[in-house]
Image (cartoon, grey):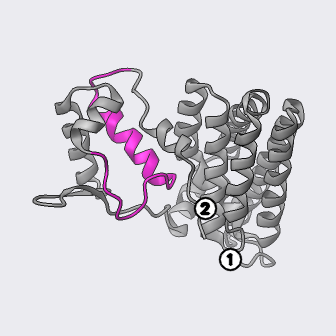
Amino acid sequence: MEAQLRPGAREAIFAQLIEAGRAEQVARRLTDAIILGVLTSGERLPSEQELARRFGVALITVREGLVILRETGLVETRRGRGGGSFVIQADAPDETLLHTRLRGVAHVELSDLAVYFSTIIEGCAERAALRAAPQDADRLSEWLAQADWDRDAGARANAGGFYLELAVLSQSARLVREQVRLQAEFGPLLLLGLADPSMRASVAACNTDVVAAIRSGDGPHARTLVAGQVRELAEWLHAAKTRIERGGTLHAASAVSA
């Protein structure tokens, strides 16, 4: 199953916006939350008044942001008792869309995105090891124990959730915001490699080791571990793109998508 994201990730999504007054920012923050699985299909969003309070924007700004989400088919608003705005599309982009997107991204751009992604999540992991309390490591370990690494979709959701938890444990609001933004942009592509069972096993084992490094306060080791994980995923992605360019399929013949 997909492990339930800890409260820290949800608090990060609903943190105040840097530049108040822009409906597009409200829509983007909520869209990122839906893409990353922090907000799930069928879930009711906080009220418009509560969203305005959390984001630190005017009520009209929230309403305009919700209009954008309705127009893109991500939420619907129901009237009457028990009404509100509900998530109606929380699925990650399907493989056909990701295949098309991968074809349109140059190898050099993939490399640059991977470097940027790795730099941010490495910083999150290192700071998490230096800042997290023992009980934080315990909760993260329990979270991982519930995560499903046997299926493609579950593994992607839980790998992304783990990255978000590292960002939250870094206790840096800026790192959290940047990780959310970058993960929504690049995460669906980077995590394509989790269709490969051996990659899923590798990431699951690595994340367990990352938690151990956080528990022991070993920031450099936590940083090294996540850097290696992103590098492995990026190498898989480059190989997949090469196969596509040569007329092959997204996955190698040996990789069986669950």
> Label 1 to label 2, Cα distance in Å?
20 Å
Q: Position of residue 178 (x, y in %)?
A: 56, 31
Residue segment shown in magenta: 19-46
Q: Which mark is residue 155?
A: none
Q: Position of residue 123 (x, y in %)?
A: 73, 29
Was residue 63 drawn as part of the magenta stretch in this picture? no
Q: Position of residue 132 (x, y in %)?
A: 73, 33
Residue depicted at 75% across the width and 70% down the height: 196
Q: Position of residue 91 (x, y in %)?
A: 46, 64
Image side of residue 51 versus residue 111, left or right: left
Callout 2 amino acid = Ala
Q: Is residue 245 something one can see in this rendering?
A: no
Residue highlighted by disc 2:
3
Q: Is residue 165 something one can see in this rendering?
A: yes
Residue depicted at 63% across the width and 27% down the height: 171
Image quarter hosting the N terminus = bottom right
Image quarter hosting the C terminus = bottom right
Vertical comparison of 26 with 98: above or below: above
Image side of residue 189 versus residue 134, left or right: left
Q: Which numbered disc, 1 or 2, marks the residue closer to the eye? A: 2
In the picture as drawn, the residue positioned furthest to the left comes out as 80
Question: How packed is label 2: few (under 14 Cα within 10 Å), some, or many (20 or more)?
Answer: some
Residue highlighted by disc 1:
257
Vertical comparison of 200 with 183: above or below: below
Callout 1 amino acid = Ser
Q: Reading the chain from its start, which is encountered first: label 1 or label 2?
A: 2
Q: Quadrant of residue 164?
A: top right
| Between 204 and 46, the one nearer to me in the picture | 46
